[in-house]
Structure formats: structure tokens, C-alpha cells
Image: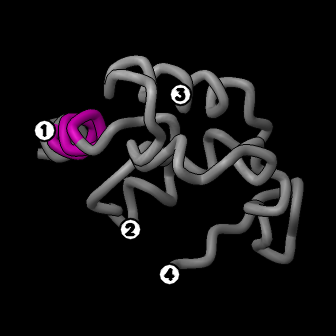
Amino acid sequence: MAAVRTSADEGGNWRRQAACTEVDPDLFFFESSGRTRGQQARAAQAVCMACPVLAVCREWALATRPEFGICGGMTPRERRVALARRREVAA
């Protein structure tokens, strides 16, 4: 796993500041019952949108490319689209 450093946490331990540390991890991996996938994704993304380290998490998610779950406030499909756009811009 790549270490991401922020000015908020020079030790690279930005995850300690993440809003998701206070939430059941199943919310981010579509394992919770009683919700549709879309409802669950929106609920997880709402946690991300209020996160103080969202930008750093998003960069980590795009750099490490986790295959499953909400990460950096994005679904796997949204991460793939964001990476494709970055490649287009760089070309």
C-alpha cells in the first residue's frame, strides 16, 4: 500500500482522520443488508463527502486502484472513469 502524506498529518497516517473509521466497513463494500446497492453506495459516499481527508483518500484510491467498494468517495466504475479521464488529459 502506498503511503500518502498530507500537510495535516506529516506521518502519512491520514487514515486516522478519515470519517469512515467511525462507520461499519460493510457500508463501503456492499455487504450490508436491507438496502439496494444504489442506496448503500449513496450512503457510503455521503460519509466520504463529509470527510476531512477526502482529497488524499481519492488520490490514494486512484493510485492503488482498489477493485471493490467505495473508496475516495467513488465507486469502482467512477474510479475507472476518473483514471481514463486522467490518461486522456495527459495524452
> Which element type, helix, strand or loop, lies under badge 2?
helix
CB within 8 Å, label 1 to label 2: no
Q: Name the residue under label 2.
A: 64
> Which element type, helix, strand or loop, lies under badge 4?
loop
Q: Name the residue under label 3.
A: 45
Residue 13, percent from left and from top: 79, 71
Q: Name the residue under label 1.
A: 88
> Horizontal placement of 17 versus 25: left or right?
right
Amino acid of disc 3? Gln
> Horizontal placement of 43 versus 12: left or right?
left
Front-lying residue, 45 or 11: 45
Q: Residue 9 is drawn in which quadrant?
A: bottom right
Badge 2, how many Cα within 10 Å: few under 14, some, many 20+?
Answer: few
Instruction: Work out whether mark 4 precedes mark 1 in sequence or the reverse, and give the earlier one.
Output: 4
Instruction: Work out whether mark 3 precedes mark 1 in sequence or the reverse, and give the earlier one.
Output: 3
Amino acid of disc 2? Thr
Amino acid of disc 4? Met
Residue 54, percent from left and from top: 65, 40
